[in-house]
Every structure is written in structure tokens, then in C-alpha cells.
Amino acid sequence: MAYTESNMLPLGTKAPDFELRDPATGKTVRLQDVASPSATVVMFLCNHCPYVLYVNDEIARIVGEYGSRGVSFVGISSNDAEAYPEDAPDKMPEHARAVGYTFPYLYDETQDVARRYDAACTPDFYVFDGDLRLFYRGQLDGSRPKRNPVPPTGEDLRAALDAVLAGQPAPAVQRPSGGCNIKWKE
């Protein structure tokens, strides 16, 4: 698994719309269904990536903490499930339960949504303000398994969420996320 850093979509970009299936419910979920007037976090995740697995507990803590403050969260898996069957949509609901995801965890079968967000790796985080304009994109924090094996704190994502909720400017320093590359179809 190649280490890949996230692309840095320009701040202020309008959140690309999506319409994806939720493997847990079989229902279609659109961006408007999950958007919050406070802030919306779109996360590109997958079941098997060691970088995602390393931070899942912290993601669950942040979702619990900031969800109660009006922030909405959605996870999207865009990996090629044929080449990586552990990321198949039928495995996503059980994985979500096992790691404590309480947000919709959607499957991007065509990978079009990942392309529109310019997502490159898992995990990859995007914070949109109440107008669905990009406020933050990048890392959860500086922790990385093997590369920087400190306990995840979520400090970068937390700082961005605190700022957007307080009506403050976006963090001046935004560092790319890093992890496994999205497994693109041939």
C-alpha cells in the first residue's frame, strides 16, 4: 500500500454534490440529506487501510463530541471493491458497527465522487461551513502508524471544527492527510 498525501482542494470550493447508496440501509443518500447549517464533514475512509484503522477511535470520539454541537458527518468509501474485496459494500455495515461509526458510511461505486472531491487517500477529511464552502481539508492530526506512532488526538480537525463553529477564519496552516491511496479502478 503506497503512502499517499491528500490533494488540497481550494478553500471556498462548493461541496460537490453526491447521491450514493448506504450499504447499511440500501437507501440513497444525497449531500443535502446530511448537510448541516453549522458544518459538514466529508471523510474518505475504507475498511482495510491501516491509516484509517489507526484513527478510527478518534474519529468516533470527534463525531460524538461535535455531532452534539450540530456538525454532521458522512463517510465515503471509493475503493475498487473487486480488487479489494475487504472494502466491498456488503462488508461496510459490519465494519462501521465494529469501529463505532454513527454516521452514514456510503459506497462510491463509480469513484466519481472521489474524483469530484479530488480525494487521493484514506483517510481524507473535508470540512464545509454552513454554506457548504470548503473551510478545511487535510489531516486529522499528525499521527501515522509506523511513520509517527503517537496516539491520535484529532487536533487539526478539532481546531478547524472549533473555528468554523465560532465563526472564525479557517486555520492558516492546513496539512495534507496521509495514508493509503484510493484504490482506483483500471
Image (spheres, rainbow, N blue to C red):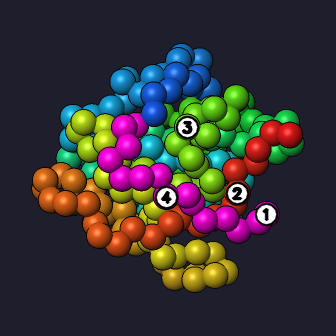
Distance from Cα at disc 2 to Cα at disc 4? 15 Å
Residue 3 in the image, given as x and y percentages of width and height: 70, 68
User: Residues at badges 1 and 2 in contact (C-beta under 8 Å)?
Assistant: yes
Which numbered disc, 2 or 4, marks the residue closer to the eye?
Answer: 4
Which numbered disc, 2 or 3, marks the residue closer to the eye?
Answer: 3
Q: Secondary structure at mark 4?
A: loop
Residue highlighted by disc 3: 116
Quadrant where the image shows the N terminus: bottom right
Q: Which numbered disc, 1 or 4, marks the residue that appears first in the sequence?
A: 1
Q: Give the amino acid type for the residue marked by disc 3 in the picture.
A: Arg
Q: Which numbered disc, 2 or 4, marks the residue that appears first in the sequence?
A: 4
Residue highlighted by disc 4: 8
Residue 58 in the image, given as x and y percentages of width and height: 44, 62
Distance from Cα at disc 2 to Cα at disc 3? 16 Å
Report the residue at 67% width, 35% height from top: 111
Residue highlighted by disc 1: 1
Report the residue at 36% width, 53% height from top: 11
Q: Give the amino acid type for the residue marked by disc 1 in the picture.
A: Met
Residue 103 in the image, given as x and y percentages of width and height: 44, 38
Q: Is residue 31 above or below residue 99?
A: above
Residue highlighted by disc 2: 181
Q: Which numbered disc, 3 or 1, marks the residue that appears first in the sequence?
A: 1
Residue stretch rendered in magenta on the structure: 1-15
Q: Is residue 56 above or below residue 71?
A: below
Q: Give the amino acid type for the residue marked by disc 2 in the picture.
A: Asn
Left or right of residue 167: residue 5 = right
Quadrant where the image shows the C terminus: top right
User: Residues at badges 3 and 1 in contact (C-beta under 8 Å)?
Assistant: no
